[in-house]
């Protein structure tokens, strides 16, 4: 049955992926009307998240952010599909790294690199970074239940010389690369809510004390990795700029959880600057104290 669903949906996805960008965004406007106006996808969750995270704003101000967020969500989803067929020249024009020399200097230290980022703006197009790196790139993700769509995601990423590893595969992969002296770059989206039974650190995020992922920091300490924060800014529709900031060049010497907390402060700053580009549909504060 899963294969039948894949066969039915794949041609539709491919047709979307080959649409010129102007038509793609017209279609996105239509999807927005269905998703937000008609279905109201996770609207209750989004409103509660905005209320919790941005209590200083009025209800009217949060409603404006809500509408902008759903419009961006539709754009981002279709841009993700567009990745199936987009050219190297096109994606490099639309997702630009502003200070990539910082990353290149870290590569010269012969240490693997952990990149921490948020579910903000275009976290899907970060994969284009692999066009510029010398290290092998790994993206850590949650496996898709449908194995055929999971395989599709892998094939898309492979065109950018990026390897996808599941959260369960992350530790064995990093450990094996460390033992074999394979210098690599690992991408961690560390801003979402972990399961309560694996939580060992709480921190304030947007003013609310919540459990947080510490895997990127702890693995960086154990396997001697440099740590970078990657910040993505949406310049205009379909165009993004990424800047990097060093979180640590000697993670072992940093007190536990300091890197994680610093990362959260930078994500907060990013959200306050333009909250409509954060992924508000996830129940980030469901385990708040």
Image (spheres, rainbow, N blue to C red):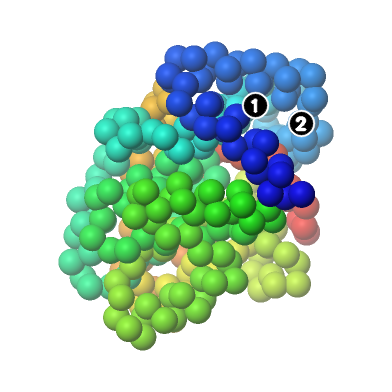
- 43 displayed left or right of 8: right
Q: Nearer the viewer, residue 94 or 241?
A: 94
Tag shown at residue 283: none
Q: Residue at x 35, y 45 (%)?
A: 128
Q: For the C terminus, which image quadrant?
A: bottom right
Please tell me in which quadrant of the rendered image residue 31 appears.
top right
Q: Residue at x 41, y 81 (%)?
A: 176
- 135 displayed left or right of 25: left
Tag shown at residue 41: 2
Q: Residue at x 39, y 27 (%)?
A: 239
Q: Tell me where residue 139 appears, x and y as whole percent.
A: 46, 58
Q: Is residue 71 above or below residue 135?
A: above
Q: Is residue 264 visible?
A: no
First of labels 1, 2 by sequence position: 2
Real-space Cα distance between discs 1 and 2?
9 Å
**Label 1 sits on residue:** 70
Crowding around mark 2 (Cα neighbors within 10 Å: few <14, some 14 to 19, many 20+) is some
Q: Nearer the viewer, residue 272 or 27?
A: 27
Q: Residue at x 76, y 49 (%)?
A: 1
Mark 2: secondary structure:
loop
Asked if the residue under mark 2 is in contact with the one under mark 1, i.e. CB atoms within 8 Å, the reply is yes
Please tell me in which quadrant of the rendered image residue 98 appears.
top left
Mark 1: secondary structure:
helix
Crowding around mark 1 (Cα neighbors within 10 Å: few <14, some 14 to 19, many 20+) is many
Q: Tell me where residue 61 appears, x and y as whole percent.
A: 67, 21
Q: Is residue 143 visible?
A: yes
Q: Tell me where residue 58 appears, x and y as whole percent.
A: 71, 23
Q: How many marks?
A: 2
Q: Nearer the viewer, residue 159 or 5?
A: 5
Q: Nearer the viewer, residue 154 or 182?
A: 154
Q: Tell me where residue 277 appears, x and y as whole percent.
A: 55, 33
Please tell me in which quadrant of the rendered image residue 22 appears.
top left
């Amino acid at each position: 049955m899963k294969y039948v669903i894949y066969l039915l949906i794949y041609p539709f996805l491919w047709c979307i992926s080959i649409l010129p960008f102007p038509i793609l965004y017209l279609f996105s406007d239509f999807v927005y009307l269905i998703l937000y106006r008609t279905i109201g996808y996770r609207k209750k969750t989004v409103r509660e998240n905005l209320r919790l995270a941005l209590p200083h704003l009025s209800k009217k101000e949060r409603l404006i952010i809500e509408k902008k967020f759903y419009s961006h969500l539709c754009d981002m989803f279709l841009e993700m599909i567009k990745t199936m067929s987009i050219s190297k020249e096109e994606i490099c024009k639309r997702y630009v790294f502003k200070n990539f020399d910082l990353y290149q200097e870290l590569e010269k230290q012969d240490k693997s690199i952990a990149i921490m980022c948020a579910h903000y703006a275009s976290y899907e197009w970060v994969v284009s970074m692999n066009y510029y790196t010398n290290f092998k790139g790994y993206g850590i993700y949650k496996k898709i239940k449908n194995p055929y769509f999971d395989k599709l995601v892998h094939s898309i990423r492979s065109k950018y010389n990026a390897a996808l590893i599941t959260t369960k595969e992350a530790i064995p992969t990093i450990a094996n690369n460390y033992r074999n002296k394979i210098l690599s770059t690992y991408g961690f989206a560390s801003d979402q809510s972990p399961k309560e039974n694996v939580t060992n650190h709480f921190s304030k995020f947007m003013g609310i004390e919540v459990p947080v992922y510490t895997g990127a920091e702890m693995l960086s300490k154990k396997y001697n990795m440099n740590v970078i924060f990657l910040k993505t800014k949406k310049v205009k529709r379909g165009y993004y700029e990424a800047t990097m900031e060093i979180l640590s060049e000697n993670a072992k010497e940093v007190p536990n959880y300091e890197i994680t907390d610093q990362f959260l402060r930078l994500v907060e700053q990013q959200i306050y600057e333009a909250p409509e580009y954060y992924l508000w549909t996830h129940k980030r504060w469901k385990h708040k104290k």
